[in-house]
Image (cartoon, rainbow, N blue to C red):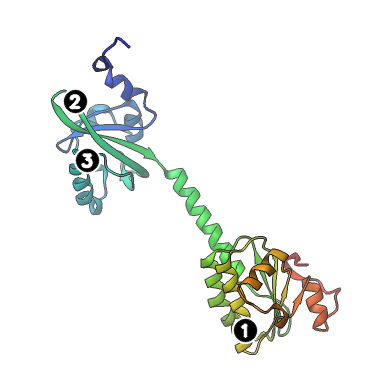
Amino acid sequence: MNESLSQIDYREIMEYSRDPLIIHTNLKIIDVNHVAVDFFRATKDKIIGASPLDIFQEASKLAIEERIESAYQQPAKVIEETIYRMDGTTVEVELYCHPVQIGKTKAIQTYVRDITERKEKELKQLEIMKEINELSATLVPVLNGIAILPLMGSIDEDRAKQLLDEVPFKVQEQDINFLIIDFSGMYTLNSVVTDYLFKINNVLSLLGVRSIITGLRPQLALTAIQLDYKLDSIPTKSTVKQALHSLGINQNLTIPLDIK
């Protein structure tokens, strides 16, 4: 390559970037690309000359100023912030900045990436997981004194702890004498989660509640044995209907939530 890298048009590189780019020095914006102009909803003349701190919430400005100062020496870590556009609207962004040399001026180049859509998806996922967690601790009443605890989906350690905390209280609140713990909606469990789930049986026994385990797959049964749980001491049935039949309930009874 005969061409000197120094001849590369840096401004052209900025303009081709798909992310908003801000060049600033001494807390003063000296250049932006066209994507940044569109993103901040202002003219280029209005943005240039402003302070990069103006886009941040008051509570964040001190930390951001310190971050900018350190970025003159080395690239700063990627962070997430809520910032203001020039029209006063807020937006969730990911920020990354690093030092650049503009002629004899040492400056900072900041990349701004809109993560609003990603944050909305994350929030929706958290809400879904919250609903699942609540459903996972729901006791389905069948008859007076009899209920089913359907374990569904993937249960992590936090959900298992939640079950251990909530199920004994709900059993007492609903005056349950027999609880059918159905594992048929689960396919994988690690040893820590399995330990928590089987502890529920021990707690129920102390409360005088008889539990029956159904839908236990061979892999889960093997894990339980490896944890030294004596499955022969816990009533187990293949299906919820078999468990109900063992309690003297007609197998033709309609089971809530399509549990079989």
Sequence order check, earlier mark of 3 and 2 = 3
In percent of the image, x 19 and y 28: which residue is there?
101
Question: Label 1 sits on what residue type?
Answer: Leu
Is 179 above or below relative to 61?
below
Q: Quadrant of the C terminus?
A: bottom right
| Residue 163 falls left or right of residue 52 | right
Q: Based on the displayed image, in which of its 4 quarters is residue 252 positioned?
A: bottom right
Kindly identify which residue carries mark 1.
204
| Residue 14 falls left or right of residue 231 | left
Question: Label 3 sits on what residue type?
Answer: Ala
In percent of the image, x 81 and y 73: which residue is there?
241
Kindly identify which residue carries mark 2.
102
Kindly identify which residue carries mark 3.
71
Q: Is residue 159 visible?
A: yes
Q: What whole-number distance in Å separates the C-alpha atoms at marks 3 and 2?
A: 15 Å
Residue neighbourhood size for the residue with mark 1, other residues' Cα within 10 Å, grouped as few (<14), some (14–19), many (≥20): many
Assign a secondary structure to mark 3.
helix
Q: Quadrant of the N terminus?
A: top left
Sequence order check, earlier mark of 3 and 1 = 3
Q: Based on the displayed image, in which of its 4 quarters is residue 210 positioned?
A: bottom right
Assign a secondary structure to mark 2.
strand
